Amino acid sequence: MGLKEVLKPLGAWRQIARKPHTILVPKVHREAAERYRGFHVNDLGKCIGCGTCAAVCPNEAIDMVKIEGIEGKKGDSGFRPRIDYGRCCWCGLCVDSCPTTSLRMTNEYIWIREAPDDFVYIPGYDIKGFEQKEKGYRKDKEHSFTDYHRVPMREKEPEERLQTFAEVVLGYTEEEARKEADRCIGCGLCISGCPDRMHIPDYIRAVASGEYERSVNIMYENNPFAELCGKVCTRRCESYCSLGNEGDPVAIRWLKRFATERFSDLKEVIRARKQELKDKSVGIIGAGPGGLTAAYYLALRGYKVTVYEAMPEAGGMTMAGIPKYRFPLPSLKKQVEFILSQGVELKTNYFVDPEKFRNLMEIHDAIYLGVGLLKPWKLGVPGEDHPNVIYAIDYLRKVNFNESVKIGNEVVVIGGGDVAIDAARVSRRFGAKVTIGYRRRKVDMPADREEIEGAEEEGVEIWEKIIPLRVEDAPEGRVKLVYGKARMVDQGPGRRPKPVLIEGEEYEILVDRIIVAIGQQADLTFLPQEFAEKMEVERGRIKVNERQMTSISGIFAGGDVANRVADAISAIADGLRAVKGIELYFQGKS
Amino acid sequence: MSTEEVRLFIGPQHPGVTGNMSIEVLLKGDTITWAKTHIGYLHRAFEKLMERRIFIKSFPLVCRICVPESDTNEENLARGLEELADIEIPERAKWIRTLVLELSRLQMFIMWYGGIAGSMGLSTPVQWGIGDRDYILDLFEELTGGRVYHIYILPGGVRKDLPEGFEERVLKTMDLIERRLPEYDELIMDNAVEQKRLKGLAPIPKEWVEEMGITGPVARACGFPYDVRKNSPYEAYDKLDFDVITEDGCDVWSMLLVRRREIDLSIKLIREIVSKMPKGEFLTRLPNVLYWEIPKGETYVKSEATRGEFGYYIFTDGSGKPRRVHVKGPSFIHGITLLERLLVGQNIADVAPILVALQICPPEMER
Ligand SMILES: Cc1cc2nc3c(=O)[nH]c(=O)nc-3n(C[C@H](O)[C@H](O)[C@H](O)COP(=O)(O)OP(=O)(O)OC[C@H]3O[C@@H](n4cnc5c(N)ncnc54)[C@H](O)[C@@H]3O)c2cc1C
Ligand code: SF4
Ligand code: SF4
């Protein structure tokens, strides 16, 4: 140690001439980094109030609150996150979890107010002035907590499919199912889209954790056709899955399929509690999914139930309509048998005519009408009564009941719904060349997208904007469809464009069969006149109240015959609702 | 108690104490005859809080166990959970993590370098340390979105990739810091006062190192070549070229020398990491974090923090929350076991430099 150690430290004086590290806030504004985690902003139009941000926040800084101007609807809870900056630690976990990517952070970090309450606010609603800031922490979708990619469903190759009526869809493996189920963030918004309000996040989480038996039991709380729905449900729920806003919705339907398919004997699995027997009986007309659902839950509640079905098998349209490559017979039998095992009596080949109806009214304390829509709509064009014009539901019923049908080598299917697609794909399996003629555009087709794609993969050709004009006889036992073309006329916002015939043009197609699939209607001729007079019918559907009771006290109805959303899950929901309605009716409360 | 002795509490409100703790001492004149560390001023119960949280929610929490060097906590917890959940992370993630850890060590050492001078009343380098450290915090801000609490290392890898041109800015900052270091050296190392006060101060008997489990720069100042980065390499440390730094004096001055050399080593390692940074993915997708359950198991993971060996003992029971997490901060040993014995016989004026030399961080004792 010497003089050096005394003098050297004096070098620090050099600093005096240097620029300081510090800046003068607020005179100088320092822009924070591009990904800085500063105050939040939320795109309220994009946010769906799923509450995931609140669920993941480690500090419980987020409350979901109701705000004026935003109403809850399907797929949107109507709530929005409010953040308490007295608790927030700016971790951004909320941003990384937000499935819609509506929530992000700005790089704004200075905001001075006197009132502490100013620091509890609803981003996007309480305007703070930094909403327009572009910079700040954002979610990178591929590196976040949300998995936007669905585990693809494996299917048979199109060539192989055409050889048989075996199921097209191969199903998830256990690993695939658990991975897909784990994508669910549990927000429950899908429930708002399910007519039957199934406990979707619960049974999906049970699949994710490998508790399949529990999963199926949750499903059976309000749906005794869970496997049916796992295969062919219209899956309205999936349209409201929060992941669907920015990616693939969770494969809710396929997960239901996976869980239910694991068990061949439902009696070993479903722990349904049967209540003690009550001395009331219910007659159910029609063994479709709606009628059988009502039967199942009524039986569990201790009522005596008899189901009357005109066809030789139960299942309604799921037996007679839906083709077996989508819904195999053993699956239907398994579900129906379990329902019957709860003490439901089924009478098949029992067509209820007016006489029998009067009798049923005598012997039962309540009646449920689940008679569906059995009568096809006609095209209403000249020549339609040609023997080569057939109707899809008749055709499909014959196929499903193994009756012989001849369709020849070439068919044209008229229609754009699921029934039209089914008729087309079934015809392909019989080796026919199939064309679908639809009066609107392909994008307007009400059929399920996956079904349309499946049909095209199998070689079905889809012609758009086809308007049938008349049917003419053709040589060699064939038939001619004369048709015009439509142009689409805009009907204003929110409405489907309307097809309008282009006058003066005519085209024709020569085929062996014309299959008409433009919809079905109710056939209520089984009602005796004194009942038919009193039964209110609205635009072809039986009118019911919120408990499924018709305008005649003690007569309930549901499913296709009453519900304009004609699908299995709506029929199931109606059946379940009717059970509550019937019970209240018995208790004299309605 | 003899009337010649004075009982004194140093801290918790005392500028020379390195955080919320106090040291109760008995003094004979200026000499300490007995010392006791008191903790309990923080009461944050990190470990207990973790037991009630799903795994992901612990990350914004654990970084607070050591404010100035938060990344060690994130990295340990992430690595431990990855091990228990059997998650393999991408190579690039390991290198980015190593970069973050070294940057974190470097900024901590720089701040410390100023701090040791400050503990003896030389406050200029304290400001320098804080100022120069901020250039590294700028890098953190750019990389992670946060300056102090980064919440950047999560199970599966890291949260975001390196921004465009980040490596060059890291290298530039290294050059800047390297240019500044001689000025610190002049003011601290080459300073007669510092030398006089620190050389030979508070020598640690070598046998205490193993007896008490002393680690980090304190152990290395006693000649023990123990460095977790070398002895049990993690992330990308096994692919880096470096030797463990040791000194032999066992005193505060040797601790200063070790840390001064660690600064150079960190700069060297950061440059090496940047030059070897592999391309590719930086994150392995985790299961759904809201429902993430980790199989039953236990593990102890550790890393080299600037203060010594930092470890996480994690016990999972198959549920979505840890059954038990125990955080082993080096300050527990250095601030209680060692400090209480080391202070005996020391001058009261040296308490502050000794505390800084042992680099005691109270939240590590009160997890
Ligand atoms: C070809 C086709 C494909 C379909 N695909 C799907 C699909 O993929 N997904 C989906 O969700 N839905 C689909 N549906 C619709 C679905 O099948 C129906 O919405 C559902 O079956 C309606 O159930 P329900 O209980 O109301 O009546 P239905 O299933 O129509 O059953 C009514 C039952 O009542 C019986 N019945 C009627 N009158 C009498 C009487 N007087 N006496 C005794 N019995 C009588 C009938 O024989 C029939 O069995 C499809 C329908 C068809 C035709
Ligand atoms: S996670 Fe996103 S979409 Fe869901 S409530 Fe929060 S901000 Fe809205
Ligand atoms: S940034 Fe973190 S603490 Fe703040 S609201 Fe979001 S999740 Fe909660």
Image (cartoon, rainbow, N blue to C red):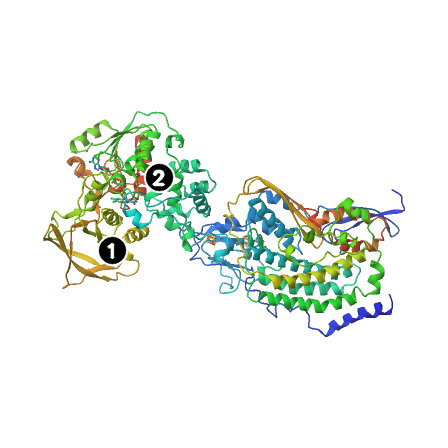
Q: Is residue A275 left or right of residue B121?
A: left
Residue B26 higher or lower than A498, as above or below: above
Alpha-carbon neighbours of circle 1 within 10 Å: few (<14), some, or many (≥20)? Answer: some
Q: Is residue B350 visible?
A: yes
- Is label 2 in contact with label 1 (beta carbons under 8 Å)? no
Position of A351 with respect to B103 (left or right) is: left
Depicted B138 relative to depicted A380: above or below: below
In the drawing, what numbered circle is on residue B44? none
Q: Nearer the viewer, residue B158 or A374?
A: B158
Q: Which of the pair A385/A52 is nearer the observer? A: A385
How far across and down, in percent of the image, does residue B156 sit? 55, 52
**What residue sits right under mark 1 in the picture?**
A461
Disc 2 secondary structure class = helix
- Select label 2 or label 1 by which is in front: 1
Please state which amino acid type lies under the numbered disc 1.
Answer: Glu
The amino acid type of the residue labelled 2 equals Glu
Quarter placement of the N terminus of chain A: bottom right
Q: Residue at x 71, y 69 (%)?
A: B179
Q: Quadrant of residue B120?
A: bottom right
Query: Residue B201's quadrant in the figure?
Result: bottom right
Tell me the subunit letter for badge 2. Answer: A
Residue A75 image position (x, y, % from top left): 39, 50
Q: Position of residue B44 (x, y in %)?
A: 65, 47
Sequence-first tag of 2 and 1? 2
Chain letter of disc 1?
Answer: A
Residue A227 has which mark?
A: 2
Question: What residue is shown at x 32% (from left), y 25% (from top)?
Answer: A278
Q: Say whether residue B326 is left or right of residue A420.
A: right
Q: Is residue A198 visible?
A: no
Q: For mark 1, give the secondary structure.
A: strand
Q: Where is residue A158 drawn, in percent x and y?
A: 31, 50
